[in-house]
Amino acid sequence: MSSTPTPGPAGPARPVVVGTDGSEPARQAVLFALREAQVRGVAVRAVRAYGSGHEDPSDLGTPVWPRTSGEPPTHLHDVVAREVTDSVEELRRQVGEPFVEVEVHCERGRPAQVLLAASQDASLLVVGSRGAGLWGRLALGSTSTEIVHHAHLPVVVVPGEPPA
């Protein structure tokens, strides 16, 4: 699923970067990014941060194994990358043709930092919002809020589902 962006008149087309962690808000963000990339005729870079070393909402779906050091198991990267690849491929088929090329990028670290670094050459950064509200931002920090305040490119925050 990796790709090389299609060259355009001013050089390579800049991808749409999307943060994903397997949550429903992240799935909605990936769907948005895939559709936007179709319109723009560019690739998508699906980014997953994991194992940031502190309790982080984005680590909720990360497999956990007992460990003796502060480092995650060496095969954790492969497990996370496979989960992201499978999830994004499912959503890519759901969106349909024309199929968008997707590159999966998984890195250990804080989600906002990993996403901002991975979007240095991007045209757009897309993230989902869990809707934790003010208390959630104060208690846990908010990846989407941090990204909006530190981004060097346009950002789309795809809202979570409204409360029932």
Image (cartoon, grey):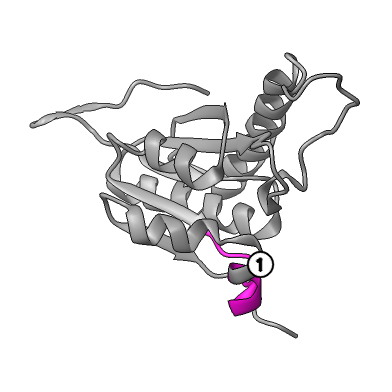
Task: Provide residue 64's location: percent of width, then percent of height.
Answer: 85, 33
> Residue at point 72% right, 22% down?
71
Q: Which residues are magenta?
A: 128-137
Give the quadrant of residue 68: top right
Query: Which residue ends up furthest to the bottom in the rendered image?
Result: 164
Query: Which residue ends up furthest to the left in the rendered image?
Result: 9
Residue situated in front as seen by the camera: 30 or 93: 30
Query: Is residue 132 on the magenta stretch?
Result: yes
SS class of the residue under badge 1? helix
Query: Which residue ends up furthest to the front in the rendered image?
Result: 69
Task: Provide residue 69's location: percent of width, then percent of height.
Answer: 79, 20
Query: Which residue ends up furthest to the right in the rendered image?
Result: 66
> Residue at point 30% right, 36% down?
120
Crowding at mark 1 (Cα within 10 Å: few <14, some 14-19, many 20+): few
Image position of 48 (left or right of 18): right
Question: Mark 1 — residue?
Answer: 139
Query: Is residue 150 on the magenta stretch?
Result: no
When the figure is inspected, residue 87 is found, relative to residue 5, above or below; the finding is below
Residue situated in front as seen by the camera: 38 or 11: 11
- Whether residue 161 appears in this view of the structure is no
When the figure is inspected, residue 151 is found, relative to residue 9, above or below; the finding is below
Give the quadrant of residue 98: top left
